[in-house]
Amino acid sequence: MAGKREKKKKGGFGIFVLLLLVVFALIYIIASKVYADYKNYNAVMDPDDAAYYSVNIPSGSTTTGIAQILYDNGIIPDIKKFKLKSRLNDLDGTFQAGDYQFSPSMSTEEIMQTLQNGRIATVNFTIPEGYTVKDTAEKLTEDGLIGSPEEFYEACAQDWEKEFWFLEGVTAPDDPSGTVPAEANRLEGFLFPETYQINVGSTAADIVRRMLSQFDSVFTPIWESAGGTQGGKVNGLTVQEMATLASLVERESKAATDRDKIASVIYNRLDIGMKLQIDATVLYALGEWKDRVLYSDLEVDSPYNTYRYAGLPIAPIASSGKASLEAAVNPASTNYIYYVLKGDGSGEHNFAEDAATFEKYKQEYLNSL
């Protein structure tokens, strides 16, 4: 009997060892899978695709919803692993809605950090100095930031004077090119030229507001430093007239050192009732920019044409940068009433107080051609 009991003990021990081995094997298999999954938490969708794609995360999205959106856009390779990593790291509920730029080469961890920070996707655009409302609308359309120039014109035509003091009393002249509605053209000279960074998905109205805000931040200190007030004048000019004069300086100046002197020529001519005779106003009146003004162009009948009509044009002809706005408000103190481009390629002008000197400089320029 003792021998049989001993055999049973040995048999029971063997079964115990076998079960123990099975348990260890299962633990190993499970642990290996968990470890493999853990290693893949940060796996990227496509390490060779470094391009960034726009992805919108709607307000109120859950982790599951966000994972589905990212998966559908080809940003993450696995929805379940994204959700598991979020839960294990206690990130559920910390992701923010918005428009993002994600790349398939980003790790899950990088994507989650971006979603936590709420780093909204942005895009840059540049509006050069001297651009018109029409130029701006066309460039924004070409850059894919708006659907059409008409979309921008519609935004420009909104009631912006309620937000921006400098638009009070600004008139709405017709656009000589016949393209821009008068209600939109009233912002000519007030859309500040600059390099901007905006959120992806910004509307045309968002862009207009941003450009007007930048004009406000640049122009208001210049205006106020010269004693200007809302509805008041500086150097005898209203805000719109000052923006008009600045736009002439902007279009006429090629060298930065000439701006305040060109402004002084304009003021001096206004003071003596002499026509400004500025080529840029003729080109604006024609509705096109070109390299040379023909004698026949000078006959265009337009209130912008300073060869035909004395005084400033009825409104600005372009957007002015800070330097031109400063020159308009603070012109150089001179007796110059003429200027002509030098023929040395420097972009600078020769300035003259009398017609004889002007003719001399003019001939020098013509001889250089």
Image: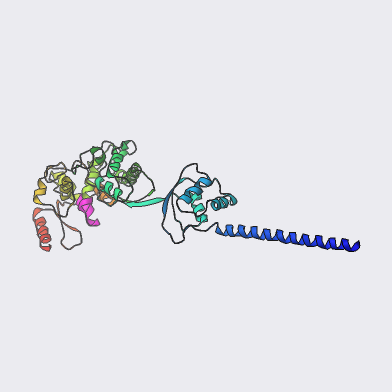
Taking the magenta stretch, the answer to whether it contains residue 248 is no
User: Which quadrant of the structure image shows residue 238?
Assistant: top left
Marks counted in the figure total 0
Residue drawn at x 12%, y 63% is: 368
- Classify residue 3 as left or right of residue 234: right
Closer-to-camera residue (321/182): 182
Q: Quadrant of the N terminus?
A: bottom right
Position in image of residue 123 (x %, y %): 37, 51
Q: Quadrant of the C terminus?
A: bottom left
Closer-to-camera residue (331/104): 104
Closer-to-camera residue (281/126): 126
Q: Which residues are magenta?
A: 250-263
Residue furthest right in the image: 1
Position in image of residue 342 (x %, y %): 16, 60
Taking the magenta stretch, the answer to whether it contains residue 262 is yes
Position in image of residue 117 (x %, y %): 49, 50
Q: Is residue 150 visible?
A: yes
Position in image of residue 314 (x %, y %): 19, 41
What colouring does the structure picture have?
A: rainbow
User: Which quadrant of the structure image shows residue 153?
Assistant: top left
206 w.r.t. 85: above or below? above
Q: Is residue 332 visible?
A: no
- Classify residue 118 as left or right of residue 306: right
**Mostly what secondary structure, the magenta segment?**
helix
